[in-house]
Image (cartoon, grey):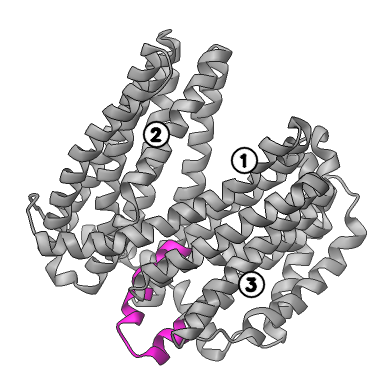
Amino acid sequence: MNPAQRVGKNVAWMLVGGALGAVLQMLAILLAARGLQLNDFGTFNYLLSFAIVFQFLTDFGLTNILTREVARRPNDIPHLLGSAKGLMWALFVASTILLLVVVLLLKVPASTKAQSFVMGLASLTILQAISYSAVMRAIEAMEFNAISFSLHKGLFAGFVAVSLWCHWGLWGVVISYLASCLIFWFFNWQIVRWRVARVSPRIDLPLWKSMLSEAIPLGSGLVLRQFAWQADVLILAWLVDATALGLFSGPYRILLGIRTISMAFALPLFPAMIRSAQNTEEKFGEFYNRAMKWFCCLSMPGAVLFIVWPRLLIDVLLGEKFINAESVMQWFGIAFMPMFVSSLFPFIFTALKLPGVFCLAMALALVVRVGADLAVIPSLGYMGACVVAVFSEIGGFAILTYFLKRKGYALQMTDFLVKPILASLLMAAILLPAQHLTLLPALPVAAVAGIVYLGALFLLGTFSSQELRLMRDGLGFISFYFRRSSHQLEKQG
């Protein structure tokens, strides 16, 4: 399987695994919502948020650094993974102590403290599991990552169903989460032992220092980025009423949810990005421009739907009570492209060994965003927050591309932006007359508009002959699987 086929295979697996995992996770949440008392379900949401935040803070970008190092030095995997596991276990012990201290300081009932500790431990086991996922990502075997992700979410949903059927209440759901995380960890560990290498944790202080020195600024940048996405909501909750906050938050959660799709496309590119960064600046510049252009082309249809069909999207996804948020949805359509494309940046700056630059850019973007929110929300309300969110996403994108240009990687704006915008205008022209249709009559119109958009991209010469060949080669992984299956059947016969 050639590099293009591996990328195509990995993208397909990540999209299927991500979609299935998202559905199974939603099923687990819905089961908990239906089976628990209202106050217990509220507590569970708090516990889940606590676990996710704690996991994010303890990872701090370390798994991205491990992926890069394994992709750069595939022949040294036993040493790299063993040393990384030693570091992970040291962090596990330190994080467990920190978790205990934090839980004891929480001003919640004793039972909730105990449940918080169990959920925190579960999040730490996820960190151990994704360290193995980082290795599979580096060697471009992401089918196992997709399977393990879906398995984790499916086990959680299944365990929740069983615990509620047994009337174990909130504690049953908490233990279900821990059990699914432990199996997720065990599965990834066994896959790496079987596919890659059997390793034991080891101490390598120079490597630990090197990894942490890059992980800390990268993790800081990721934390700042996450906080920037929540800043608008937090400031709105402080300055406006709950109704205005709801009108803003409904469409905004949809926009943030798009990151799942963009990450499914970005993750498979990371190993190829790392290898490209080891070549000349010219080679990486070509890869960077190609990836950014593809992501821009993928994002434009979503942006058009947000802008042209806001009422239909709100009716289908949010319900009639959000109908006054049409203008919010349209504003977020402008932010759709920069947010979608920006999912590439953490991986680009990691591959180039520029985590400090990424952190600085995110800090600048956050300061500007918070300052703008505080300046305009008191007078303009939630629409002011919309404007700030849109220009903050555009500004953050501009800051990151500027820093890359300073490093010698300029973005070719004509191919990247102008041609996709022209194609999207044709798509919008087809969608506009049908903006008042309901879902079923609108689907064939959307299909026609999508075909016209793709045709316009090709007619405008958006993709070079080399890029078209790479796309064709990428889809070749399907025939590769069929040939391998046929060969195996012939051997068995």
Q: Which residue is mark 3?
A: 297
Magenta span: chief secondary structure: helix
**In front: mark 1 or mark 3?**
1
Q: Secondary structure at mark 1?
A: helix
Given the image, on which type of amino acid does mark 1 rest?
Leu
Q: Position of residue 357 (x, y in %)?
A: 42, 71
Q: Nearer the viewer, residue 290 or 329?
A: 329
40 lies above or below 322: above
- Looking at the image, which residue sits at the far top? 167
Q: Nearer the viewer, residue 89 or 138?
A: 89
Residue 268 falls inside the magenta stretch: yes
The residue that appears at 67% across and 82% down in the rendered structure is 458
Marks 2,3: beta carbons within 8 A: no
249 lies above or below 442: above
The residue that appears at 36% across and 12% down in the rendered structure is 110
Give me the C-alpha separation between circle 2 and circle 3: 35 Å
Q: Which residue is mark 1?
A: 234
The residue that appears at 54% across and 64% down in the rendered structure is 364
- Mark positioned earlier in the residue sequence (2 or 1): 2
The residue that appears at 29% across and 64% down in the rendered structure is 214
Given the image, on which type of amino acid does mark 3 rest?
Cys
Q: Nearer the viewer, residue 429 or 229?
A: 229
156 lies above or below 354: above
Q: Which residue is mark 2?
A: 51
In the displayed structure, does residue 110 sit left or right of residue 341?
Answer: left
Q: Quadrant of residue 282?
A: bottom left
